[in-house]
Image (tube, grey):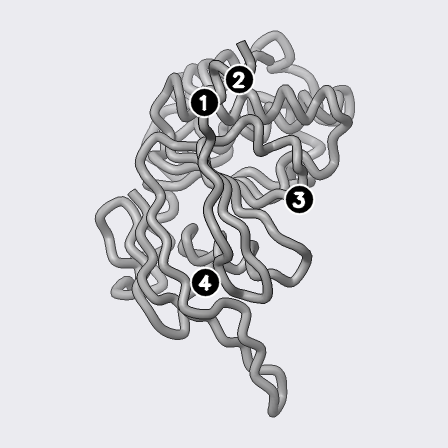
């Protein structure tokens, strides 16, 4: 599903070069929940942005869902993201003047779907994440965990193959964080989504299929679960 070969990313700051990633080779399988971990400045968010088509490598190849992203124009890359990827962020990024259902509908406004079908899909996505009864509530009336569930519903409403999550538990308490991690695991196990998450949260390792550690732009190792997350939390 996701394959990076000898990928490096170099940023220029005035006369200096910042080597954010160095010769990364990585393969992520379809329908697996993977975590990218490492200290601040390790390159994990840069790596996630390359996988999501939000940035381009300085060298090497990025192939996602059978498409080599290096070869796409900016417009084609935007269309690829809309078709194949859903995004979850640390701070939810919900529109405060819209209720939960209308927030979830937002990605569908770029499609040719009619209003009724958009509403039905939004309610289905909210049902999947367990907050359908909160569809008519504004973000301000929702808990942090509920807001992140709405954000995940928005990420999956267009039925993407891949969900990328950038510190999705970073603004949540321990109970809400565990619920969100369980939900992301369920998206992979039950619905076959390929989920890639950047996180500092060490608790996440009990929920994912594989953990990839980075340090100073270098991929250190992969830690794969010895038992399935479902068995570990049953």
Mark 3 lies on a secondary structure that is loop
Of labels 3 and 2, earlier in sequence is: 3
Image: 44 above or below 15: above
Mark 4 lies on a secondary structure that is loop
Viewer can see residue 40: yes
- Which tag is nearer the camera, tag 2 or tag 4? 2
The mark found on residue 232 in the picture is 2
State the residue at coordinates (47%, 30%). Answer: 225
- Which tag is nearer the camera, tag 3 or tag 2? 2
- Which tag is nearer the camera, tag 1 or tag 3? 1
Which residue in the protein does label 1 denote? 227
Viewer can see residue 94: no
Of labels 3 and 4, earlier in sequence is: 4
Quadrant housing the N terminus = top left
The 10 Å Cα crowd at callout 4, few under 14, some 14 to 19, many 20 or more, is: some
- Name the spot of residue 92 as percent of width and height, x first: 65, 36
Which residue in the protein does label 3 denote? 200
Front-most of residues 15 and 227: 227
The mark found on residue 181 in the picture is none
The 10 Å Cα crowd at callout 3, few under 14, some 14 to 19, many 20 or more, is: some
- Name the spot of residue 218 as percent of width and height, x first: 51, 64
Which residue in the protein does label 4 denote? 55
- Asked if the residue at tag 4 contacts the one at tag 2, i.e. Cβ–Cβ closer than 8 Å, the answer is no
Of labels 1 and 3, earlier in sequence is: 3
């Amino acid at each position: 599903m996701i394959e990076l070969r000898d990928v490096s990313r170099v940023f220029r700051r005035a006369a200096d070069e910042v080597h954010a990633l160095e010769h990364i080779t990585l393969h992520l399988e379809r329908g697996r929940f993977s975590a990218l971990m490492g200290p601040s400045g390790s390159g994990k968010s840069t790596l996630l942005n390359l996988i999501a088509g939000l940035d381009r490598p300085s060298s090497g190849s990025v192939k996602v869902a059978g498409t080599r992203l290096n070869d796409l124009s900016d417009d084609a890359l935007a269309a690829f993201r809309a078709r194949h990827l859903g995004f979850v962020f640390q701070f939810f990024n919900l529109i405060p003047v819209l209720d939960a259902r209308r927030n979830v509908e937002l990605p569908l406004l770029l499609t040719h779907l009619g209003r009724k079908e958009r509403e039905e899909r939004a309610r289905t996505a909210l049902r999947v994440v367990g907050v359908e009864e909160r569809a008519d509530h504004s973000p301000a009336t929702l808990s942090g965990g509920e807001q992140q569930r709405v954000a995940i519903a928005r990420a999956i409403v267009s039925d993407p193959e891949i969900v990328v999550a950038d510190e999705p538990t970073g603004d949540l308490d321990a109970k809400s964080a565990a619920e969100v991690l369980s939900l992301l695991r369920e998206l992979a196990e039950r619905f076959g989504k390929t989920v890639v998450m950047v996180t500092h949260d060490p608790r996440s390792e009990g929920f994912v299929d594989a953990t990839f550690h980075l340090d100073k732009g270098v991929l250190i190792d992969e830690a794969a679960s010895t038992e399935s997350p479902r068995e570990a939390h049953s």
